[in-house]
Image: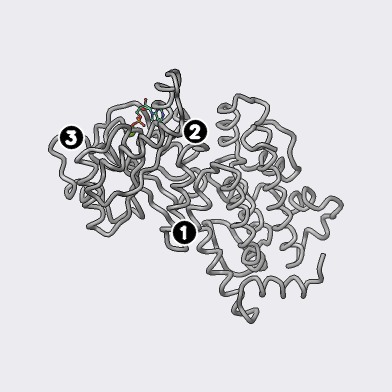
Amino acid sequence: METPDAAVAEAIKASGESTLEKATAKAKETIDQLFNVSLNVAVTGNTGSGKSSFVNALRGIKDDDDGAAPTGVTETTMEATMYTHPTMPNVKIWDLPGIGTPNFKAEKYLKDVNFKNYDFFIILNSQRFTQNDIMLAKEIRKQKKNFYFVRSKIDNDLRAEEKKKGFDEQKLLSKIRDYCEKNLEDVGEPKVYLISSFDLEKYDFEILQNTLEEDLPDHKRSALLQAWPVCSAESLEKKIKFFQRMIWAASFASAGIAVVPLPGLSVACDSSMVLLFLSRCYYSFGLDEGSLSKLSEKVNKPHLKDMPKSKLFAAMKDKVFTRVSSSAALTAITTVELLFSLLPGVGSAVAAGISFTTTAYLLREGLNDLAETARSIRKEAGLDIA
Ligand SMILES: Nc1nc2c(ncn2[C@@H]2O[C@H](COP(=O)(O)OP(=O)(O)O)[C@@H](O)[C@H]2O)c(=O)[nH]1
Ligand SMILES: [Mg+2]
């Protein structure tokens, strides 16, 4: 490990600032943004187009999980239903009412659902886009918000055709995409993303993610990167790099800057910030119980859930009970435990007063450990060819 001065100097350099004071001030802002940034995603479209299923998919939960948006039911309210992201309370996915009624009025609809609340809209359709979709998109644009057209249930279309002679998946996908886009010439030929809520690893889900990242302002992009489900090896690596870039700030924050990222959690205690940071990584990489059980069901490998993993992973798995990172669950892991899991041989005397150097080291090692675990699970699941 480096000497304390070297670690501090390195963190200042990573901050892009020239002095310790400026770096700590920037760290406070960065960490505050990391933990508290809000994002509101509106999911709209016809009744039956797959809105509620898409909402659940974005939240990384199964349709029959507790707290899932009910699917396959006819909507009866004209109100938007809010679903918080399971691990980021400030990220909210809104299941909007269906727009399929014959006398649909886009302007009134947007007013009714409080359109100002949303960062962007996703307009779903499982067939061809209709006049209502187009009217809605135009009205959203008029209100200076972004919208994205998503053609849902694409797995159904493929299944219906795959037994036919001469079936070519790429050709069929292009055909559907062209058909939908032609249908939308009226709104300036926007891109249409083909998606199956049952398999986010396939089709255009990742392209949609990349587009959203490009379109969102910096601070919102951070929420998206953390909350968006892992849908490819690349998207996992992007998340890992994102958290790596935050380590300098988390190190300063752990060193006692007055930041209170969650109510009731004192960051005066060095380990809270380290744990909070690592728990964000843990959830963001899809290592929590809910995500793993969803994955193991999908690839039909029950053992994935219980794969032997790192000591840090085990320490977090046993202690982080709820999917929302609550302060109570986090403080249940003690500094000593964390140190033992990451730095075998470190005694409790050291744990009593961990230094800047140790904190920075813990953050880096902890992140690497979780990243490796996430990579090996993807490999074992057969998602990435080794
Ligand atoms: N095959 C397939 N079925 C889907 C998909 N998304 C939704 N569904 C099904 O379509 C039906 C309507 O979905 P739901 O999410 O309730 O639509 P909503 O009325 O727009 O909220 C349900 O039976 C879902 O299981 C998908 O991506 N693929
Ligand atoms: Mg619904």
Q: Earlier in the sequence, mark 2 or mark 3?
A: 3
Left or right: residue 315 compared with residue 232: right
The residue furthest bottom is 19
- Taking the spot 59% from the left edge, 42% from the top edge, the residue there is 286
Image coordinates of residue 268 in percent, x first then y, are 64, 64
Residue at mark 1 to residue at mark 2: CA–CA distance: 28 Å
Q: Which residue is mark 3?
A: 101
Residue 9 image position (x, y, % from top left): 72, 75
Instruction: Out of 73 and 355, give the one closest to the viewer.
Output: 73
**Quadrant position of ligand 1:** top left
Tell me whether the residue at label 2 lies in contact with that at label 3, contact meaning CB atoms closer than 8 angstroms: no
Give the residue furthest to the right.
345
First of labels 1, 3 by sequence position: 1
Q: Residues within 10 Å of mark 1 (few under 14, many from 20)?
A: some
The C terminus, quarter of image: top right
Q: Given the image, on which type of amino acid does mark 1 rest?
A: Val
Q: Is residue 154 above or below residue 206?
A: above
Identify the residue position indicated by label 1 in the image: 37
For mark 2, what is the residue? 199
Give the residue displayed 61% in from the left and 78% down from the top.
17
* Mark 1 and mark 3: Cα distance apart in space: 35 Å
Q: Secondary structure at mark 3?
A: loop
Residue drawn at (17%, 48%), measured in percent from left and top? 108
Of mark 1 and mark 2, the one earlier in the sequence is 1
Q: Is mark 2 within 8 Å of ligand 1?
A: yes
Q: Residues within 10 Å of mark 2 (few under 14, many from 20)?
A: some
